[in-house]
Each structure stands twice: as structure tokens, then as C-alpha cells.
Amino acid sequence: QVQLVESGGGLVQPGESLRLSCLASGSIFSINDMGWYRQAPGKQRELVAYITSGGSTNIAESVKGRFTIFRDNAKDTVYLQMNSLKPEDTAAYFCNADIIEYTGWRRTYWGQGTQVTVSS
């Protein structure tokens, strides 16, 4: 059994920063790509950023230059550093990870989400 647990969301004012964390735990042999998605009310879930096991990243144009994704492989954790937040960044943020378990099964797991609200 594998779990992803996000933390770090909250209510901030425009221009402020937040750092989201996502910890993977359980029967993990290895983790490939890890990513962050977000979903605002009434909108589809969209990719924010992902990072490969080797550290290559892909950042959505809408957040490029403001958000950074990085990971600590020793801790099975991925982070999303969000700077210069805007009201349009308000959404539920979800992490996911492509995980190979000790059983040999490979699956994409999702966290439960953490809310980020940017408002004055």
C-alpha cells in the first residue's frame, strides 16, 4: 500500500509565497516522475509541474518564473515552491507519483489534495 500526503496549503494574500510538500510512503521500491496538478472550482484539473527521477522539470507556462518544483529522493518527497501568488492560482493542489512497488506493480498514485487560496 502506498500513500501520498500533501501539506502546506492555506490562505495567503496576492504576492505572497507558499511551499507545498508531498510525502510518499508505503511499499515503495522506486519513484519515477512526480508532479503537481491543480483544479479550480468548475475547471478541469491541470498540470502545474512535474519532475523526473533525474531532476528534469516541466513547468506550466501559467506559473513559469513563479513556481519551482523540486524533490528529495531520500525522503520520497516532492515540493512545489510558489512565489508571487495570484488570485488565479486559487485551487486544490494535488500531487501524483509514478511508483514501482516492491511487489513489482507500477501505478500512478494521487494525494488527497491541499487547498491554496489567494485573496486580499
Image (cartoon, rainbow, N blue to C red):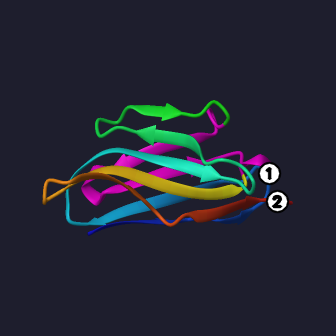
Count the numbered circles shown. 2
Q: Residue 30, percent across and down?
A: 21, 51
Nearest to the observer: residue 30 or residue 67: 30
Residue 117 position by quadrant: bottom right
What residue did someone put label 1 on?
A: 87
Question: Is residue 93 inside the magenta stretch?
Answer: no
Q: Are marks 2 and 1 in contact (CB under 8 Å)?
A: yes
Residue type at the position of mark 1: Pro
Identify the secondary structure beneath mark 1: helix
Asked if the magenta segment contains residue 83, the reply would be yes
Binning the other alpha carbons within 10 Å of mark 1 as few (below 14), some (14 to 19) or many (20 upward) gives some
Task: Residue lying at the far left in this picture: please name it.
Answer: 103
Quarter containing the C terminus: bottom right
| Residue that numbered label 2 is attached to | 119
Residue at 59% across / 34% down in the picture? 60
Circle 2 Cα neighbour tier, 10 Å, few/some/many (<14 / 14–19 / ≥20): some
| Residue for point 71% across, 54% down | 40
User: Is residue 87 left or right of 96 when viewed as pictured?
Assistant: right
Q: Residue 84's image quarter?
A: top right
Q: Amino acid at mark 2?
A: Ser
Above or below, comparing residue 1 to residue 63 in the picture: below
Region in magenta = 63-89
